[in-house]
Amino acid sequence: MSKSLLTAALLASMAIINPAFAEDSKLIRSISLSGHGEVRVAPDLAIVTMGVMSSSTTAQEALAANTKSMNDLMAALKAASIEAKDIQTSNFSVNPRYDYGQNNGQAPKLSGYDVSNTVTVIVHKIDGIGDLLDKAVSSGSNQINGISFSVANPQDAMDAARKQAVQDAKRKADLYAAATSTSLGNVISLSEGVSAEPQPMMMRAKMASASDAGPVPIAQGEQVIGVDVNIAWEIK
């Protein structure tokens, strides 16, 4: 077969195959947009890290003092109706303490030992957390490392935020469709991302009994439950 005849045969076969191939590989026109929804709710539990730091010239003396103070703290938490399941040891350490002074290049001198024991406490009655902190400090706690707030059951708030996020994405998709003289078809894909962002809170506590001034002031603020979605629609 001559080269010209072979070329003609190939072109003819492509003319037969290409329409079906083009139909199968037809790209679906689509529009993809993101939406955001968020719901603000008051937190109903707090997580507090507190404990005791004790120092002495020997590790044994520092440990004995720390153990006594921690037992007093645990008793105070129990008296405040904090259940055992909501108290968990988060750190325990025994560290030597050195006096660097003015040694003119000489090695630092061992001056004693520090023993630290901290627990993470989940507080379900956050309206009384200020009073709890006061009792903890009065019982011997000299370390309160921070407070964070959370929502025990955020599912309802998350579902409300999901609906808002879908509505936000759909609103923008309708706007773009109208601007381009098209219309939306079926949803092709949907993905979700979730975020929970606590608002800044204020804590003011003295490492001494605050009974004269009343309970430690605490502002719980609000918890923001946020949901982001990305949705793709077919364009008609």
Image (spheres, helix red, strand yellow):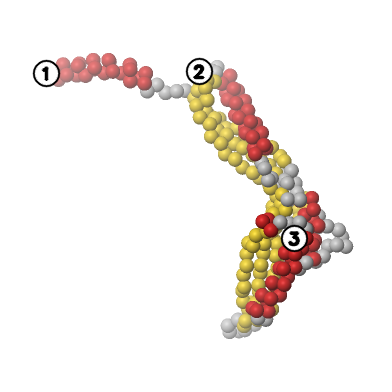
Identity, as a three-letter code, of the amino acid under mark 1: Met
Q: Residue 52 location, x and y as percent? A: 70, 68
Identity, as a three-letter code, of the amino acid under mark 3: Lys
The tag on residue 1 is 1
Q: Nearer the viewer, residue 49 or 107?
A: 49
Residue shown at 66% from the left, 41% from the top: 154
- Where disc 2 sits, the SS reads loop
Residue picked out by circle 3? 78
Q: Nearer the viewer, residue 39 or 129?
A: 129
Residue shown at 67% from the left, 37% from the top: 156
Task: Look at discs 1 and 2 and give the one toward the viewer.
Answer: 2
Q: Are marks 1 and 2 in contact (CB under 8 Å)?
A: no
Examine the image and state in which quarter residue 16 appears: top left
The tag on residue 236 is 2
- Where disc 3 sits, the SS reads helix
Crowding around mark 1 (Cα neighbors within 10 Å: few <14, some 14 to 19, many 20+) is few
Q: Residue 19 location, x and y as percent? A: 33, 16
Q: Residue 128 location, x and y as percent? A: 79, 53
Examine the image and state in which quarter residue 71 appears: bottom right
The quadrant of the picture occupied by the N terminus is top left
Residue at the outermost right position? 212
Query: Is 75 drawn above or below residue 185 in the view shown?
Result: below
Residue shown at 64% from the left, 78% from the top: 59
